[in-house]
Amino acid sequence: MKALTPSGRVVAVAAVVLAVGAVALHYPELVVVSVGAAVAVLGALVWTRRDHPVVIGRTLTHSRVAVGAPAEAVVTVTRTRPGRRGQATTLRARDRIQIGRAPAEEVDVLLPPATDGSGPPATYPVPTGRRGVVTLGPLVVDRVDPLGLARRTIGRAEATTLWVHPRVHVTVAPGGGRRAHPEGGDDVSSPQATTTFESLREYVIGDDLRRIHWRSTAHVGTLMVRNDLDTALPTCVLWLDTDRASYTSDEQFEEAVEVTASVVVAAVGDAVPVRLMSSGGLDVDGTRCSRTDLLDRLTTIELDDRGPTGGRDRLRDPRRTLLLVAVTGPASHGDAGRLELLGRRFGEAVVLRVGEGPTAADLCRSWTGAAR
């Protein structure tokens, strides 16, 4: 696709206006200027008409980063047909960046000229100031004339995404999800008869050979290991209040998400069975997910209008769920009765409330001090 740039349109209009003025005012000097402007526009169109097929590539330095962490996009251009010796190609890339549901923005990237093959890559920063999924693309590469009056699209790169995770602060895992092993230390699985079959998975180096399920191994042709679940092992439920009425600002909700992310990451890192839930319908078994999976879920979570204890009927089998950690905002004080009712389903309940004063980092430090 070939078109004039905004500067090219201005010059083209100026050429017409000057020509009309020269005729109306009988001012021949304006004709020279008008012809010069017209020649510049026509020359730009001819320049960009030349065929320079290229292959465009765009990669990200990181696919997932925390809020505020640096991230860059790298654009590479490879000419599929070498040009004349010493002939440089001036290219300009236009990328579209959209964060969540916010309006998309366009970024212009000037690519270094390349005479043959692949030119040096160009980089530009990707905004990471807000939690969410950043969609980049499609990226369009244009050939631009030296005066910047015309451009022609000669290549495209498909869209890609960057996950901007909530910040994770240093804290400790919930203590209610662990139990002391009779031999000393902590363990998350019981060697006794309280275990029951849960699922099968492929063998990885280090697994106990006694847990290999030989019948499934013979059927599948791959070593399969039996996963057992300890029905007596307590589980921690991390409950995030996503009710819009519980917070007085979006910033407070972001603080609540950071607290939730910090606690759930500490639980997973310390092998504490945790269940991540929200009043808006999120329900994830932390024992089946990695740290990245859980942060991905929290990256896309949003405020809703379901109430601070919405979905509480999903909390079943309280015999295994002994600790509730509820994260909410300052405006939920009026719903203390409903939060208390929710906490009665557990052996122990803790409410972490973000507000105008304490930040997510402050709450995590307080949680660490209380746990010790």
Image: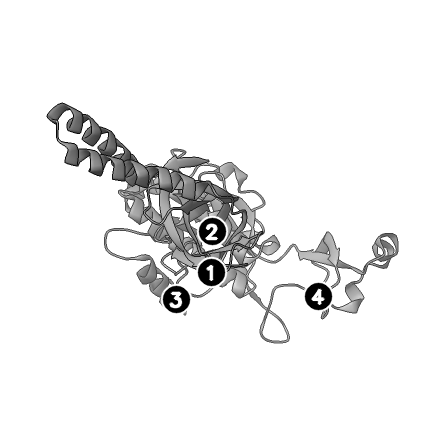
Viewer-nearest of labels 2 and 3?
2
Mark with earlier residue (2, 3): 2
Type of amino acid under label 4: Pro
**277 and 1: which one is in front?**
1
**102 and 35: which one is in front?**
35
What residue sits 27% from the left and 51% below the top?
355
Type of amino acid under label 3: Thr
Type of amino acid under label 1: Gly
Q: Mark 3 touching mark 1, by CB under 8 A?
A: no
Q: Is residue 329 visible?
A: no
| Residue 270, position as x, y percentages in the image | 53, 66
Q: Helix or strand or loop: what does disc 4 sit on?
A: loop
Mark 4 vs mark 1, CA separation in Å: 73 Å
**267 and 150: which one is in front?**
150
Q: Helix or strand or loop: what does disc 3 sit on?
A: helix
Viewer-nearest of labels 2 and 1?
1
Mark 4 vs mark 2, CA separation in Å: 42 Å
